[in-house]
Image: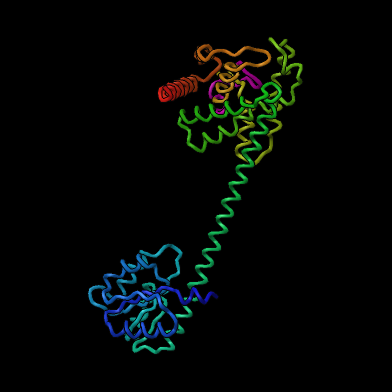
Amino acid sequence: MDELWMKSAKFLIVDDQEYNISLLERILSRAGYTNLFTTTDATQLETLYRANQPDIILLDLHMPVMDGLSALQHLRKWKQEGEYLPVLVLTADVTPEARTRVLHEGANDFITKPFDRMEVVLRIQNFLKTRYYHLKLQEQNYNLEQRVRERTKEIERAKNEILNVLGRTAEYRDDETGQHTQRVGDMAGRLATDLGLSAEEAALIRRAAPLHDIGKIGISDSILLKPGRFLPEEFEKMKLHTEIGASILEGSQFPVLQLAKSIALSHHEKWNGTGYPNGLSGEDIPLAGRIVAIADFYDALTHERPYKRAWTQEEAIAEIKLQSGVHFDPKVVEAFLRVIESSSEDEREREGVQL
């Protein structure tokens, strides 16, 4: 028990009789308590309460304008949820009815008038000890919650780093910068937002999309890095990366990896049903797969690879427009065009600021 805290505890005394306040001040001062805030006007209770945040309140029951029962009702509204703030009612009314009403309104105990010095001090000591231990418990709970929050953030950061590493693992063989996966994730998240998905859903797609080509780790370099067009049998082997990726991500209980599996399997399906591996069409293709299909296609076209030159943005946009309703979901194409236009406007504004 912290005796220093006990002696520095803050008291709020409300009694319309100056004599009673003076008597309590003498009793408490002799017991070593010095932080005493008093008033004979109960209407000042809220001002004193908020200004001083007392550790204990001594409250007269029978007062003009606002009596002790009304004051207790107000105190219940002002106290924080879960706060333990002892309130001792000062009264000469010892009838069972009065005691029941006061306890019902939230008082913790009574101090009977005329005051007995030893009784006053002992009762207050007991309630202050409870207040002290309650505050310490709150502090410990807060510190524990802080540690849990910090640990949760660390785990989340670690999980995101693992996802990024996994995404880069597959891309490193034909994109040594590893930026393709991140660009696809960023674009997919922006498309999801434009299409009206919730912030949580868009964030999930943004995090899952970089794993879309993780199955490429199962494709030989002779195919993956081949310049020029694939032979039919080579293309059939290349197409297996969708199923390999889904197999790698199979069985996870984490929503982000479950979504990543769906994306890995479906991002090469086409709106008209001519894609792979399952020949899905239209809205039978998962929405996340339809979103990543455009993000992946656009980024692949506009960046150089060992087997192709980089297309200009204008060429890539023209091709995506041409593939609307064929390769791509028309609604996702519309969202893509809005996102691209918004990005161009932002870029123009930044250039204007630099100039």
Residue 118 picture location, percent across and down: 44, 89
Regarding residue 131, the answer to whether it shows in the image is: yes
Residue 280 among those drawn in magenta = yes
Residue at (62, 21) in percent of width and height:
268
Q: Is residue 112 above or below residue 270?
A: below
Among the 4 quarters of the image, the one containing residue 347: top left
Residue 49 picture location, percent across and down: 35, 68
Residue at (69, 10) in percent of width and height:
228
Q: How many marks?
A: 0
Q: Is residue 254 above or below residue 168?
A: below
Image: magenta residue range: 274-290
* Left or right position of 7 against 38: right
How are the colours assigned in the image? rainbow
Q: Nearer the viewer, residue 273 or 82?
A: 82
Residue 125 picture location, percent across and down: 47, 80
Q: Is residue 51 above or below residue 272?
A: below
Quadrant that contains the C terminus = top left
Q: Nearer the viewer, residue 211 or 196?
A: 211
* Left or right position of 274 against 224: left
Regarding residue 284, the answer to whether it shows in the image is: no
Among the 4 quarters of the image, the one containing residue 50: bottom left
Among the 4 quarters of the image, the one containing residue 176: top right
Quadrant that contains the N terminus = bottom right
Residue at (60, 39) in percent of width and height:
255
Residue 6 among those drawn in magenta = no
